[in-house]
Amino acid sequence: MAAIEKFVFEEEMVTLPQLVEILKNNWEGNQVLQMKMINEGAKFGNGQKEAGNLACEMVNYFVERVEAYNSRYGDLIFSPCIATFSWIVNIGKRIGASADGRMSKDPIAANMSPVLSRDVSGPMAALNSYLKLSTDSLE
């Protein structure tokens, strides 16, 4: 999301329809843009405000949507959870390329961790990113 915000809307390096086509084609012929998104785009877990703010918005949105169902079905309670457990490889194999530079079929991030090999600011930056998230409602 941070890569889309920066490179599509702020810097206008590519349009959203163009990016969609690039991702459908798994970055083929667009490795320069891919490397720019990998190396210059904000990544969760590195203490970067842009990515952290988007992560907070996404977690809050998810929690609100899940909790909205708690009053619909009597005693049935839905608890929001953000976890991939050991499914990061299998999930990655089933989804296409992403705007952060991840190739189609590559693993996704584990749980709320930074994407594999993208945590370049050290463990304290990752911890600070986690601490900004509102996790009171997460199981």
Image (tube, rainbow, N blue to C red):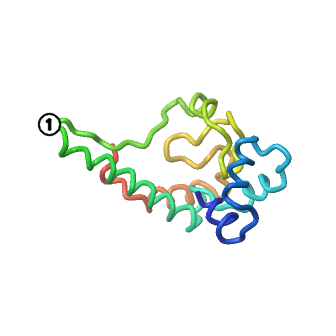
Up the image or down, 131 lies above or below 29; here it is below
Horizontal arrangement in the rendering, residue 39 relative to residue 84 (left or right): right
Residue at x 74%, y 61% (from the top left corner)? 14
Assign a secondary structure to mark 1: loop
Task: From the viewer's side, name the closer residue of 67 and 81.
Answer: 67
Name the residue tied to disc 1: 75
Percent coordinates x, y for residue 7 in the rendering: 70, 64
Pinpoint residue 117: horizontal percent, then vertical percent: 69, 46
Q: Give the quarter of the figure containing the N terminus.
A: bottom right
> Callout 1, which amino acid?
Asp
Numbered disc total: 1
Q: Image quadrant for the C terminus? A: top left
Q: Is residue 3 above or below residue 66?
A: below
The structure residue drawn at horizontal position 73% and vertical position 55%, both measured from the top left corner, is: 18
Closest to the observer, 13 or 59: 13
Q: What residue lies at 71% left-to-right and 49% top-to-bottom? A: 101
Across and down, in percent, residue 8 comes to 68, 64
Quarter occupied by residue 107: top right
